[in-house]
Amino acid sequence: MPVMLSLCWCHPAAAAGVHLALFSWFWQSSPSLALAVGLNWGLGKLNERVRKAFSGETTFEGRLRAVIHAWFDHIEQDGILMGRLLQATRNDGPHVEARNAYNRFNEKWWADLAERELGVPNSKGQIATAILLSGLEGIVQRWVQCGDSRDELEDVFMTVAMGGLHNLSS
């Protein structure tokens, strides 16, 4: 196990009130289960942050902007941990299936919303959402690697997203 990964695992264990010695034993006994627990913890934090940001918004664009902002906040706070968890589970069968199911759920949810509010056909909305979810990784990489302004990245993402969705509307 790489040292960096083991250091990252201290955070969810400590946040859950688990003694690090117990978590270390747990990790060595069942690394796949430990990855699942860590990833669920990270996604739970992200989902809670998104729910809070989302709650005050009433339009599709406002909701999407709130989600993008919450995503950046999450990456700013827990990015190293989430990056390690996602990387560690990228090729692990059960984790890939769970991530794919999570993505399909989000694609359908946003496509339904885009269909109701913007008139985007659902099948095209699901494809567009898949592209936008992938684009989030791209803007985070650019933020980390190139040092672009977070505000500018959010604004460009929103312009591309909303422009594309409006072009897809029936």
Image (cartoon, rainbow, N blue to C red):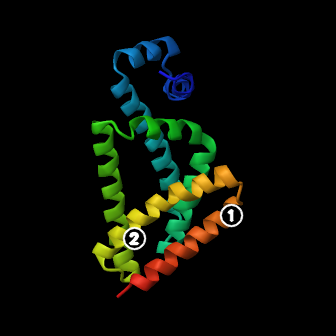
Position of 148 with respect to 64 (left or right) is: right
Q: Report the number of discs.
A: 2
In this orientation, does residue 22 appear?
yes
Q: Nearer the viewer, residue 136 or 47?
A: 136
In this orientation, does residue 59 appear?
no
Q: Is residue 43 above or below residue 3?
A: below
Label placed on residue 128: 2
The residue type indicated by label 2 comes to: Ala
Quarter where residue 69 is shown: bottom right
x and y, in percent, of residue 168 in the image:
39, 82
Task: Tell me which residue sits at (39%, 37%) in the image.
Answer: 89
Q: Nearer the viewer, mark 2 or mark 1?
A: 2
Label 2 CA crowd tier, 10 Å (few <14, some 14–19, many 20+): many
Task: Tell me which residue sits at (28%, 38%) in the image.
Answer: 93
Question: Spatial distance from mark 2 to mark 1, Cα to Cα?
Answer: 22 Å
Q: Is residue 87 above or below residue 104?
A: above
Q: Which residue is mark 1?
A: 151
Label 1: which secondary element? helix
Q: Nearer the viewer, residue 67 or 122?
A: 122
Q: Which of the marked residues, 2 or 1, is nearer the chain's N terminus? A: 2
Q: Quadrant of the C terminus?
A: bottom left
Task: Tell me which residue sits at (43%, 34%) in the image.
Answer: 88
Q: Nearer the viewer, residue 54 or 32?
A: 32
Q: Is residue 1 above or below residue 107?
A: above
x and y, in percent, of residue 146 in the image:
69, 55
The residue type indicated by label 1 comes to: Asp
Task: Tell me which residue sits at (44%, 85%) in the image.
Answer: 167
Position of 122 with respect to 164 (left or right) is: left
x and y, in percent, of residue 117 in the image:
40, 79
Quarter where residue 80 is shown: top right
Label 2: which secondary element? helix
